[in-house]
Image: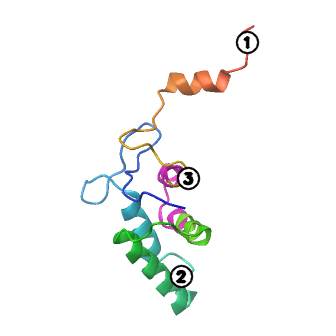
Amino acid sequence: MRVNFDTKLSDFRGRDFLDADGHPLTMRNAACAALTNIVKGDENASIEDKMTREDLAGRIWRNETPDLPVEQLALIKNRVNLVFPSAALVGAFVRAMENPPVEGERKVLPLASVQDAALEGFEAT
């Protein structure tokens, strides 16, 4: 699957997540941080596991990831979930990975649209 790691991550209100320097957080930054940071349980990880994550982070950083196999996508999503405590950030990352935005378009629906969609098919009584 092809993933655009340059995609900026934003919350459900459309506000960009920011990195430590105040710049918009991209999928590239989040994925590389998730793959290379240490979380509980990593102290028992094999050298091969650590090298696999480091190699994948390097390829993502250099934009050498034309198509990623399902196993690598699952690894990235699982690591993002472990490293980042924010449900909003994890949700934004997974949605961007599974439903990439159209070039130049932000996928943010106004609340009224979300409510209308949720009520579609129901009649007021």
Secondary structure under badge 2?
A: helix
Secondary structure under badge 1?
A: loop
As drawn, is 82 to the left or to the right of 19? right
In the picture, the disc for residue 42 is 2
Secondary structure under badge 3?
A: helix
Looking at marks 3 and 2 on the same chain, the residue that comes earlier in the sequence is marked by: 2
In the picture, the disc for residue 123 is 1
In the picture, the disc for residue 20 is none
Q: Amino acid at mark 1?
A: Glu
In the picture, the disc for residue 98 is 3
Asked whether residue 93 is drawn in magenta, I would say: yes
Looking at marks 3 and 1 on the same chain, the residue that comes earlier in the sequence is marked by: 3
**Predominant secondary structure in magenta?**
helix
Q: Amino acid at mark 3?
A: Glu
Residue ranking furthest to the front: 66
Q: Write the start and end of the magenta stretch as one range.
A: 79-96
Task: Give the vertical position of 81 relative to 48 (above or below).
Answer: above
Q: Nearer the viewer, residue 70 or 33?
A: 70
Point out residue 41 in the picture as x, y percentages from the top left corner: 57, 80
Q: Residues within 10 Å of mark 3 (few under 14, many from 20)?
A: few
At 75% across and 7% down in the image, what residue appears? 125
